[in-house]
Amino acid sequence: MLNSEVESEPRAGLKPSPGQNPETAAAPEVSPVRGFLLSRGNSAIADAGFRWLMVFSGLSIFGIVGLIVWQLALRSQLSWQKFGFSFFYRSYVDSVTHQRIFWDPVSGHFSALPFIYGTLVSSFLALLISVPLAVGLAIFLTEMCPQALRGALAFLTELLAAIPSVIYGLWGIFVLVPLLRVYVNPFLIRWLGWTGLFSGDNPTGLGFLAAGVILAIMILPIISSLTREVMTAVPQSQREAVLALGATRWEMIRMGVLRNARVGMMGAIILGLGRALGETMAVTMVIGNTPEIHASLLSNGSSMAAVIANEFTEAVSDMHLSALIEIGLALFIVTVIVNALAQLLMWAVTRGAPATAR
Amino acid sequence: MNAETFPLRPSMPPSQRFSMRSWMRGWTDRAVSALAILATLIVITPLVAIFVYLIYKGAKSLNLAFFTHIPNPPGEPGGGMANAILGSGIVLAVSSAIGVPIGIGGGVFLAEFGRGSKLANAVRFTADVLNGVPSIVMGLAAYALVVVPQKHFSALSGGVALGIMMIPTVCRTTEEMLLMVPHAVREAALGLGVPNWRSVLSITVRTASPGIITGCMLAFARVAGETAPLLFTALGNSFWSASLNQPIEALPLQIYVFAISPYGDWHRLAWAGALVLIVLIVLAVALVRFVTSRGVLKGTS
């Protein structure tokens, strides 16, 4: 019990507690109840201690963020001092082949450009595929789905979110990539090859498209469940008002629901983008891992997270390590900004602020 | 009402415009409904495909040796992932020892002490943002914090990496669960003269404990499948190891290494490992859903 801990300073409580009369406390004979209470001491110290422990736990979140920034900044000093900001956009010319190269750790050429390009291309490809599907799913679940099916479908999409990324990668290597290689890529090359986005010089099936498709599957549940959340938050009266004017169901969804939910949906999409930018394992396993920039979506590439995962344990020099950590720091800063933006948008909606109808 | 912009608009004489418009509206409605259903089917397909394929491949290669043997060298058939299962257990125990107490403490702070204060809002916001930080960055941080001072890879650093990933998740679910505890329960405890710390621990947290435990399990399941932060902290180890100071194998790490290897027998082990991992995670998620939807919390209050 607490007696043993607080017994040592039973006097401490007498002064601060406002309800107590100092005369009765000092008086020689006290009532049995009062005596019992006094003998128990009070919990001011234990309470304050507990409170500070909890506050400290809460503040540890700031501590973690601070520690990450400090450590990553410290360890990337070497490459920051050598390359400065040009690390993120420069390119080199190979002395032998006279071709443009970006990343050659052995000869000391470091530029993050191909990785930034790969991250952006695969993430936006993922958004392009997953946003229409996620919104369609959310519309179906909130507005059309029979009650009995809703729980099961929501559970299934939740499961999709819980599958570890290494298992998506495994599935990507053994199922998705062969599928793309044999059926999808030849089709795209044949019919859309003229756009220049689908060229046939990579026979492996790996590449930006495979990474984009895997990422799309992975971020779909997040976007769709958050979209569903903001769509359910739209008041029922909005739907009824639009329906009362003679709208069909789609018109009701478009004018009553989507228009009110658009800020929150934007937040959901940006949150999905944040996940896609930092996703590591599945992308590493299917993107091909070559530090090059190609316009074709079917060619091999690499992403910021993938290059860290691939090369970190095999870094050839301190500069290589430092450059990889700098890429990690850039990834951290970008995802923090993207996530903060998404959280603010989501808060604006779910906190009950009017969802800016006009 | 604006003109519909549906692409399949048929050409009709202007005299029939009005009826055509209502015809269009009806068909747009049906088309969009069909599209939404189609989207749902497209979303469900990969999930079902992944599960069916995983169970098919995994069940075919799962046997007793998987749980009792260490992997054989490439070319030799057989072997298992027993060392990876043990390693995952050790790394996850370390991470839970770090993440669960601090996370619950943070959640208690948010729900009991800082309700509505600026500081609590800032902590909540930062926790949500930290939740979206890529796991590989957490691995880099753990590398810089633990591996570099220690000068070698270790199970401890892997545990630290996963532990700091658990904190924001545990913190936020604990807060949500504590907020569901009715205020009358707290007031009753304080009215009986129970010290505040005691009332929080034995009354509020106790009441919300089913929810908090499932929240911890959810965080646990999430980090159990994490590979990226372990790549350069726990590193991997093909032999038995239970030391916190040595590189250690973990299940997702082993799956990754085996999946990108060129050996058929290792692929088989990777599928079996993936099945084991996913069964654990699905169980955790199903349990969480059961607890939160069946209102175990409401029953206790």
Image: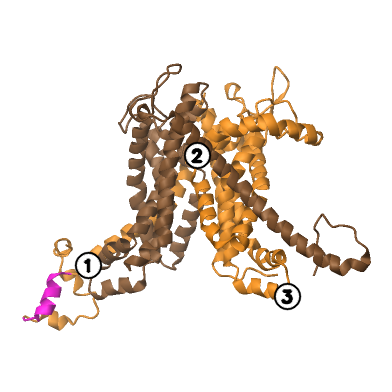
Tag 2 near tag 3, CB within 8 Å: no
Type of amino acid under label 1: Ser
Q: Magenta residues, as a range?
A: A29-41
The orange chain is A
Q: How many numbered badges does the structure rendering display?
A: 3
**x, y percent for residue A309:** 52, 33
Letter of the chain that mark 1 sits on in the rendering? A
Nearer-the-camera pick, A243 or A238: A243
Nearer-the-camera pick, A274 or B296: B296
Classed neighbour count for the residue bearing mark 1: other residues with Cα under 10 Å, few (<14), some (14–19), many (≥20): many
Classed neighbour count for the residue bearing mark 3: other residues with Cα under 10 Å, few (<14), some (14–19), many (≥20): few
- Please give the name of the residue rendered at 46% of the width and 65% of the height, measured from the top-left corner: B118
The brown chain is B
> Is residue A31 covered in magenta?
yes
Specify whether A163 is left or right of A123.
left
In this rendering, does residue B14 appear at all? yes
**x, y percent for residue B216:** 38, 51
**x, y percent for residue A218:** 57, 44
Labels 1 and 2 in the same subunit:
no
- Please give the name of the residue rendered at 14% of the width and 61% of the height, measured from the top-left corner: A4
